[in-house]
Amino acid sequence: MSKFNLKKNNKVKILLLLILLLAGIFRFYGLDWDQGQHLHPDERFLTMVLTSMKIPKSIGDYLNPKISTMNPYNVGYGFFVYGTFPLNLTKLIGVFTANNDYGTIHIVGRILSAFFDLGTVYLVYLISKKLTNHQSPTTPLLAAFLYSIMVLPIQLSHFFAVDTFLNFFIVLSFYLLILLISSYHNILISTLLGAAFGLALACKVSALYFSPIIGLGFLFYLLKSKNPKNFVLCSICFVLCTYGAFRLNQPQAFTNKNFLDPHLNPQFIKNLQELRNQGDPNSTFPPAVQWISTKPIIFPLKNLLCWGLGLPLGFTSLISTFFFIIQLSNLVIVRKRKLLKILISQSPNILGLIFVFGLFVYLGIQFGKTMRYFLLIYPFFALFSAHFLSEVSIILKKKLPGYYNFLLFTFYFLLLVYPLSFVNIYTKPVTRVTASEWIYQNIPPSSTLLEEEWDDGLPLPLPQRNSGIYKYKSVFMYDADTPEKWQRIKPVIDSVDYIIITSNRAYGSTMSLSKRYPKTIEYYQSLFTGSGDFNEVAKFTSYPCFPPGKYNLFCFDDDSSEEAFTVYDHPKVLIYKKVK
């Protein structure tokens, strides 16, 4: 290797390390964002399950779903729809590091969540490197950089849930699928692919969304290799390893410990059906109400562009995806007689596009279309955008050489503004902690506080503070408006001294449904305008602001984003006092 190539490779390695460092800072900074208050409900549930679990005495006990103490069904949790691989790993590390109690094990989970997403950054680099075939060393670096600054992955890395684990194994599966199509070490790679996909299923069964892409990938492999025998062997290896990895990491999904008996646990199937049934437009189940007025495709697209990615990167991702489609279409049009060769040579790009469009459209027309479900397509947006920006960069360098560096600096500065702004929410205590401190200092003991059911009540039990000095009453706002509902609610509201609204959960869902909640809307409007019996006395907000820290030049008001984007780590808290 020449000295020039050696220096070039060293430079690439240094830049990659800097990108991983940047990604790590974004993901690990402020991991204890709620100061030990367990304010993420899914994370809180997983923490409760984890602290109830115990390491079994033997592998045989672990694999036996009827007696395993790592089975959520056996430790008091009859409804469990998450994958158990993230819990198993967190439990093992928690026990090994003596961080196995309710107050610490969720931090272990958050650290692992961030590490797995950091792994996804590196996988994006490897995939882009494979796709560009070493033609452009900067494109893989750019792809890794773009994924490292995407805000939704940054936020989800701060939560102990299964999303970043799932995303890592899906991206790993895609990388191995590319290797399978382009390599001759097919048995080994199909084995690793099966293990990766099985682990993805053991993180969340929605990994099945990726199974058609794997099927198409195997078809491309057959077309390229023209070796049916190898194709069958690889397929068998993949299926067996997928089954084995899933079974080893989620044994509670099966009826018994016999690996030759693939029958699924009826309770596991029932849980999945119950979860699906919760998505009913006529339901008053609180998480379902928020989706009733949302528009298919439009709602998730808005949240993806504006909040999950931010407008500069969001529009870049959208344009780059269509640019990719146009490029592939031009290849087909120009080389009509070589269609099969084009399909095989461009198979990784085709598979990525099919997955992005297929998953987005499928999830976008579902009743519940929360942002985190779309996390799986974010790495592909990074790949598409890096390719597009590399092409644009070449053109700009030729056409506008005098302005090239300025334009480059300006664009990347604009890309960094939003993720740096988002980190601002982790530079200060979460709003519910700040609001709790205000309550203790400003609301007299023995006052009666009104809480909204299905939301975290305040004040929180802070150090040297006793939340028991107050009286509490609660109301359930999600029932459709009837005279009976308000006959129950109004006397409760009239009897309290303060109303504490700790997020937009209730009013954000109900105020968009004027026919179902006319009286509820009237109630909230009277609070917000001060025209009723209560006046606002305190408001606590935490927005993405630039630059992060004490002195902000501007902020992004994300009140219009999807509920789950703000309600965990930066909810708006409103406090109202009775004045009449």
Image: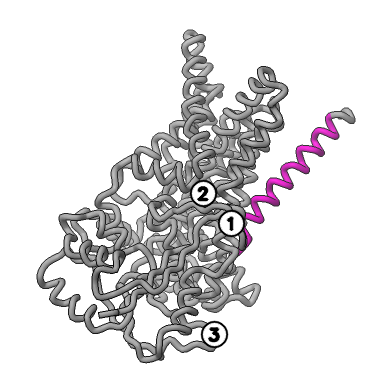
State which quadrant residue 74 falls in: bottom left
Crowd rating for badge 2 (residues with CA inside 10 Å; few <14, some 14–19, many 20+): many
Q: For the residue marked with disc 3, what is the amino acid? A: Pro
Decide: is 270 above or below 392.
below
User: Residue 552's mark?
Assistant: 1
Helix, strand or loop at disc 3?
loop
The residue stretch that appears in magenta: 5-30
Check the image and name the residue furthest to the left: 483
Q: Main secondary structure of the magenta part?
A: helix
Residue 537 to residue 556: above or below = below
In the image: residue 526, left or right of residue 134 = left
Instruction: Confirm whether residue 218 shows in the render.
Output: no
Q: Nearer the viewer, mark 3 or mark 1?
A: 1
Write the residue at 46% across / 48% down. Answer: 307
Residue 571 drawn at (x, y percent): 43, 64
Earlier-in-chain disc, 2 versus 3: 2
Queried whether the magenta region covers residue 26, the answer comes back as yes
Q: Which residue is mark 3?
A: 463
Task: Please state which of the two labelled residues, at mark 2 or mark 3, is closer to the viewer.
Answer: 3
- Which of the two discs, 3 and 1, labels the residue nearer the N terminus? 3
Q: Earlier in the sequence, mark 2 or mark 1?
A: 2
On the image, numbered disc 2 is attached to which residue? 167
Choose between 192 and 93: the one closer to the eye: 93
Give the x, y percent position of residue 80: 38, 65
Q: Which mark is residue 252?
A: none
